Each structure stands twice: as C-alpha cells, then as structure tokens.
Amino acid sequence: MKTCFFVSPIGDPGSDERKNSDRIMNYIVKPVCEGKGYQTKRADDFRGSHTITETILRQLRESDLVIAEVTNPNPNVYFETGYRWCTGKATVLLNESGNRLPFDIDKICMLFYSVALPEHIEHARGELSRFIDAELERVDNNHQNTQISTWVGTKGEYDTLESKKPDVVYYIKIKDGTLVPASSIPMRAASEEEALALSRENPTAIYFY
C-alpha cells in the first residue's frame, strides 16, 4: 500500500496540539488519502528499536506522500518539511486560513483550510484531493518543487523574480490543478494591503503593487 506521512506538532496526549493534530488528520487528511489508496501515519504511530528521529527521517525520505501542517511555528515541523522538500518527492503543506507564515515559507504552494464548520471540512477535503493530484503530476513530470500558490510583493521584487528565469521556474496552481509559470498571470493591486486581501480571497495567483 502507498504511504502518507503526516507531519504536524503532536504534543502530549490530551494537549491542545494533540487534539488539533488529531482533528486535521482524522477529519481531512485520512479520509482523502485513504480514498486514494494511501495508508496515513504520524510519528507517534511508530514503535520499534529505532530512535524516533531515525524513524521520522526514514519516513520523510521513503513515504510516497508527505502532508505537513505548518500553521503554528514549530521548529520540528519546519525542519522535517525542509528535509522532505529536498527529496523532490510529493509534499503538500496545510495552513489554517488567515494565518501568516514566516517569509521564507509563505511563498510555497500550500492549502489554506478551516475546520470551523462541516462545509469547511468538506471543502478542505476536496482541495486536498486536488492538491495531491497536482503534486503527483509535478513529480511525474519532473518539475522542480519551487511552485508557489500566492506571491505578494512590489513590482520591483516581481521583476527580480522574473529575472531569475530560466534557472528557477516558479509555478502556481490554477483551479483545475494545472501548474503554470507564475509570470503568465500577474495581477496588479493598488497597495500592499489590497494585494494581501486579494491573496487571501484567491490563494492561487500572483500579485504585485
């Protein structure tokens, strides 16, 4: 069976971190992954003679799919996500809607989700399914994992991004899951505030101001 490794802050049994991780894994990640033929596990599911660090690194290297929940700043999760990212294998990042991440990862393609209402959970499942399909397609087509879902910056910063091509190609995902170069559909906003507001409404585009 194909394997999915779920990365998130776990915390102690009964802690808010554990409850949140359980909620995301059981309500969103597992139903989608099981429907696609993946067995989903988290670090605390493994027992054996190896250290937990060895087990985690092995799962990050060998799992067919890794899904990382990066909403709350956590050094373990960020390290594990970066370690997996370097393999070039299928990786999907989750971030709770409305949360702002550190600048060095907030340009990476990720799924914005909510579990506040049942319809939000259902929407998140559908989006996760599409993200997984697009990520697997990226791996099959040997694309670099440098795609972004939302980019916000000044016109000068955007021009700098453009000047890096063809050495680095930035992609965004459009609604049908297709990867396209980010430069193909830039959108201008009147201010940084407007650009950020637009990016929250449509986290699959590139904006400059």
Image (cartoon, helix red, strand yellow):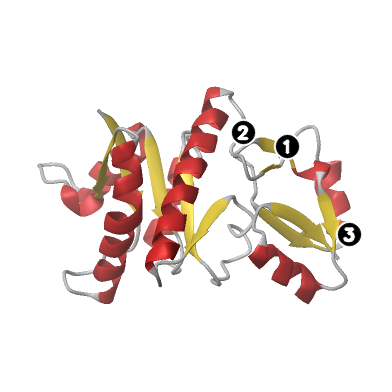
Residue at the outermost top position: 141
Left or right, 16 with reference to 93? left
Q: Is residue 12 left or right of residue 56?
A: left
Q: Are marks 2 and 1 in contact (CB under 8 Å)?
A: yes
Question: How far apart are the alpha carbons under marks 2 and 1?
Answer: 8 Å
Res. 13 visible in picture = yes
**Which SS class for mark 1?**
loop
> Picture quarter containing residue 14?
bottom left
Task: Report the residue at 54% width, 29% height from top.
Answer: 137
Q: Are the two marked residues, 2 and 3, in contact with CB atoms closer than 8 angstroms?
A: no
Q: Is residue 201 above or below residue 165?
A: below
Q: Say which residue appears at 30% left-offset and 47% top-offset.
A: 31
- 75 or 43, which lies in front? 43
Coordinates of residue 193 in the picture (x, y in percent): 77, 76
Along the line of sight, the residue nearer the viewer: 141 or 54: 141
Disc on res. 169? 1
Q: Say which element carries label 2.
A: loop
Residue visible at 19% across and 54% down in the picture: 44
Name the kind of residue labelled 3 in the image: Lys
Q: Quadrant of residue 121?
A: bottom left
User: What residue would you read off at disc 3?
Assistant: 155
Q: Quadrant of residue 37?
A: top left
- Amino acid type of disc 2? Gln
Q: Which residue is mark 2?
A: 144
